[in-house]
Image: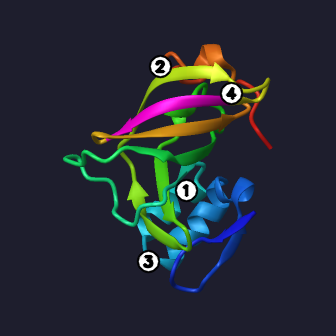
């Protein structure tokens, strides 16, 4: 499965690779977010939120975003809270970058490498599908721990 990652340039990217910092940096450069691109190439972790809605996250939004899904790849940090930036995609459009997000609770594990996590992004709620993250690491920020990273 692939999506067009952003409007300018129409770059098609497979979802598992879209969550890598290098790919995110390339997308950031194409939309002239040069500071973000620089921080991503220096190892900043990122996550991707897929949503059927074209409206970006609003702190006052009452709409639920549980239809969306985040594929999180967190490098060297336990739990999805380690991701510093979220790319918000709707179908073939890059909606925006969201640097402020936090995790809430872990849902039952789907299998040994996938965990559903409810998250809150500035007042709007969504569900993460975290790959390669152990359920017990999702209780809050735990910097400098090294769980299995999804590849």
The label on residue 40 is 1
Q: Distance between the residues labelled 1 and 3?
A: 14 Å
Q: How far apart are marks 1 and 4 (CA)?
A: 21 Å
Q: Residue 38: horizontal and vertical position, in percent?
A: 51, 62
Residue bounds of the magenta highlight: 115-121
Q: Distance between the residues labelled 2 and 4?
A: 13 Å
Residue at the location (76% across, 38% down)? 150
Would you say residue 137 is visible in this rendering? yes
Secondary element at image label 4: loop
Q: Does the magenta stretch include residue 116?
A: yes
Residue at the location (31% across, 48% down)? 63
Quarter of the figure with residue 138: top right
- Up/down of 90 relative to 67, above or below: below
Quarter of the figure with residue 102: top left
Residue 59 versus residue 87: which sits nearer the camera? 59
Q: Does the magenta stretch include residue 15?
A: no
Q: Please, which residue is most extreme toward the bottom here?
A: 9
Q: State which quarter of the image contains the C terminus.
A: top right
Relative placement, left or right, of 126 versus 15 is: left
Secondary element at image label 1: helix
Q: Which residue bears the numbered disc 2? A: 140
Residue at the location (57% across, 46% down)? 70
Q: Which residue bears the numbered disc 4? A: 133
Secondary element at image label 2: loop
Which of pointers 3 and 4 lies earlier in the amino acid sequence?
3
Q: Name the mark nearer the viewer: 3 or 4.
A: 4
Q: Which residue bears the numbered disc 3? A: 32
């Amino acid at each position: 499965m692939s999506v067009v990652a952003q409007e300018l340039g129409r770059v098609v990217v497979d979802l598992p690779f879209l969550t890598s910092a290098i790919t995110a940096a390339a997308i950031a450069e194409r939309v002239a977010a040069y500071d973000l691109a620089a921080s991503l190439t220096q190892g900043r972790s990122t996550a991707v939120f897929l949503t059927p809605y074209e409206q970006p996250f609003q702190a006052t939004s009452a709409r639920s975003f549980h239809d969306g899904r985040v594929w999180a790849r967190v490098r060297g940090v336990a739990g999805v809270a380690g991701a510093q930036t979220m790319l918000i995609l709707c179908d073939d459009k890059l909606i925006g970058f969201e640097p402020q997000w936090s995790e809430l609770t872990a849902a039952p594990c789907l299998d040994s490498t996938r965990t559903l996590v409810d998250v809150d992004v500035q007042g709007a709620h969504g569900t993460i599908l975290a790959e390669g993250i152990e359920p017990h690491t999702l209780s809050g920020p735990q910097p400098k721990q090294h769980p299995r990273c999804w590849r």
